[in-house]
Amino acid sequence: MRNTNVKIAAAGLVAALLSSTAALAAFNVIATTDLNIRSGPGPQYEVIGAIASSDTATVNGCTEGRKWCQVTYNGTTGWAYSEYLSGEFTGQPAVLSMAPQTVEIPVLENDQASTNATVGIAGGVVAGALIGGPVGAVIGGVVGAAAGAAVTPPATVQTYVMENRIEPIYLDGEVVVGAGVPETVVLHPVPGHDYQYVNINGQPVLVDAGTRQIVYVYR
């Protein structure tokens, strides 16, 4: 009987170790648009890099709720907003934030989530939310909304925006082309052009005044 109990206990330990190993395994995702990498899991943290649209990054784990995930891309490790990361889960492509709950994605505890987050924390308070942007071209071959929203502004617009900086507004979500800016956010005109601009989450962006969609991000 004792040997049987030992075998059962050993089998349980092996199963636990295998489960733990699976939970800690990193996996690859694809960015559905040009996507910021931040020093911490939130829009108030400094931008330390960016994943190019359709490029692959490695997810090391996510916060509780899977809103922000720690990623590694081209040697940079930081945090990216999961609504613009896609992967194949249970045999089907899906946005990471919408992956089935049966899919085990490593959850980073508070001490892990704070790694690299002490650099460049802004003092702003999140005062609203961006309206969801494009899912992207990598999901089922469907072209994302960003393709129609993007513009290439002239250098004179960048000069004006950079020389006339405004205080940032912090909104839940991530600054990407195609995301919508809520009506509560005041837009600022660019003289001589149809664009308007605003600083969201620490980055100047151009906005289409009619649709209130972000059409360009200054990185």
Image (cartoon, rainbow, N blue to C red):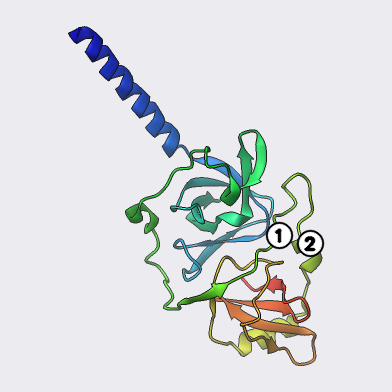
Residue 147, numbered circle: 2
Q: Which of marks 2 and 1 is nearer the N terminus?
A: 1
Indicate whether 118 appears above or below 207: above
Q: What element carries label 2?
A: helix
User: Residue 207, position in %: x, y?
Assistant: 71, 78
Q: Which of 85 and 97 is in front in this view?
A: 97
The part of the image, by quadrant, that contains residue 2 is top left
Indicate whether 24 appears above or below 219: above
Residue tagged by mark 1? 134
* Residue ID at (72%, 54%): 136
* Residue ID at (78%, 71%): 151
Is residue 3 something one can see in this rendering? yes
User: Residue 150, position in %: x, y?
Assistant: 77, 68
In the figure, is residue 64 to the left or right of 194? left
Kind of residue at disc 2: Ala
User: Residue 179, position in %: x, y?
Assistant: 68, 67
